[in-house]
Amino acid sequence: MEIRRFNRHENMSSETRKFILETITELSCCPLGSTFVVENWLYGSFDGYNYYEVAIQSHELASITAVDPELGAKIVKIFDIINEYPTLNFA
């Protein structure tokens, strides 16, 4: 699976950044315990990394969704939004 890059400064709105930060805060209260991997993917979006292909099918996201379906849906929404951004090509 490929981790793509995007231009966060050109594509990500302040509302999306706020939504990501709020979701990361919610993750800290997740009864699952360690959510480091998913938090790292979300923080990576601020650096222009698109983890959609890795995250959507991941065991980590499935585990979060199993214990907190609403939180899981928010995370999926974030990755769906990011996946719509144009991919940067480094040629």
Image: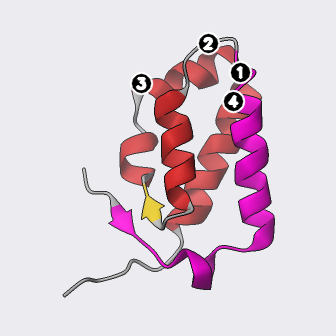
Q: Which residue is mark 3?
A: 59
Q: Indicate the amino acid at tag 1.
A: Asp
Q: Earlier in the sequence, mark 3 or mark 2?
A: 2
Rounded to the nearest whole Å, what is the CA distance between mark 1 and mark 4?
Answer: 10 Å
Image x and y of residue 59, in percent: 41, 24
Q: Which residue is mark 2?
A: 32
Which image quadrant is residue 49 in? Answer: bottom left
What residue appears at the point 72 percent right and 62 percent down from the top-left corner? 17
Alpha-carbon neighbours of circle 4 within 10 Å: few (<14), some, or many (≥20)? Answer: many
* Measured Cα–Cα span from mark 2 to mark 1: 9 Å
- Residue at point 78% right, 71% down? 14
- The residue at 34%/65% (across/down) is 4
- Any magenta on residue 9? yes
For the residue marked with disc 2, what is the amino acid? Leu
Q: Nearer the viewer, residue 1 or 91?
A: 91
Classified by dominant secondary structure, the portion drawn in magenta counts as helix
Number of the label disc, if any, that sits on residue 68:
1
Total marks in image: 4
The reply to whether the C-beta atoms of the residues labelled 2 and 4 are less than 8 Å apart is no
31 lies left or right of 9: right
Specify which label sits upstream in the sequence, 3 or 4: 4
Q: Which residue is mark 4?
A: 27
**Closer to the observer: label 1 or label 4?**
4
Q: Magenta residues?
A: 4-30
- Mark 1 residue crowding within 10 angstroms, few (<14) / some (14–19) / many (20+): some
CA separation in Å, label 3 and label 2: 12 Å
